[in-house]
Image (cartoon, rainbow, N blue to C red):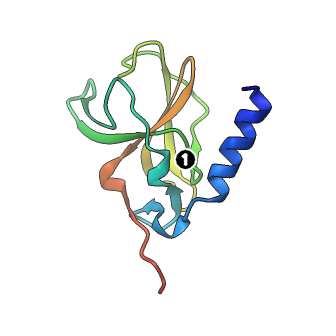
Amino acid sequence: MSTVDNQAQRGAKQSTIDWSDALVCTGCGMTVTHPDFRMEKSGRLEHLQVNPLGKTFVFSTFSRAVGVFVAAQKHQQHSWFNGYDWQIAHCQGCATHLGWQFVGDDAFFALLNDKLTVKKDAN
């Protein structure tokens, strides 16, 4: 399958997603991602890691995050995923720290479970 075919297929999937059950920022309600974008990394969907300062983080990995902005500075040191640089990811709505984007052979987001909740449908 060509790159164009792959892009068309991803676009078709995105257009069929029911965003009423999106994952949103717990701080402001901004749409951040969707459960359909969850992806396995290192054989798991959910991860528990401790940073060098001893702070524990529980996060899930996603292929896409539409409601974040990523800090410009990339870091190689202390990456939880070998071969990946990381950048801090913030909510576009309220700038809360939501997790990280990891960039290596591919790119993905590691989003903090306690910073996301299922969108409350208006109906």
Q: Position of residue 83 (x, y in %)?
A: 47, 12
Q: Which part of the image, by quadrant, shows the N terminus?
A: top right
Q: Secondary structure at mark 1?
A: loop
The foreground one among 78 and 36 is 36
Q: Is residue 9 above or below residue 117?
A: above
The foreground one among 75 and 123 is 123
Which residue is farthest front?
1
Query: Does the rendering let one see residue 94?
Result: no
Q: Left or right: where does residue 89 sit relative to residue 80? A: right
Q: Position of residue 64 (x, y in %)?
A: 55, 43
Tally the marks: 1
Query: Does the rendering let one see residue 107?
Result: yes
Q: Is residue 82 above or below residue 30?
A: above
- Which quadrant would residue 5 be assigned to in this image? top right
Which residue is farthest right?
4
Which residue is farthest top?
83
Residue drawn at point x = 49 percent, y = 55 percent: 34
The foreground one among 55 and 33 is 33
Q: Position of residue 67 (x, y in %)?
A: 57, 54
Which residue is tagged 1? 65
Q: Is residue 89 above or below residue 84?
A: below
Kind of residue at disc 1: Ala
- Which quadrant would residue 46 be assigned to in this image? top left
Which residue is farthest bottom?
123
Q: Residues within 10 Å of mark 1 (few under 14, many from 20)?
A: many
Residue drawn at point x = 51 percent, y = 33 percent: 108
Q: Is residue 75 above or below residue 16?
A: above
Residue drawn at point x = 28 percent, y = 28 percent: 51
Residue drawn at point x = 55 percent, y = 65 percent: 18
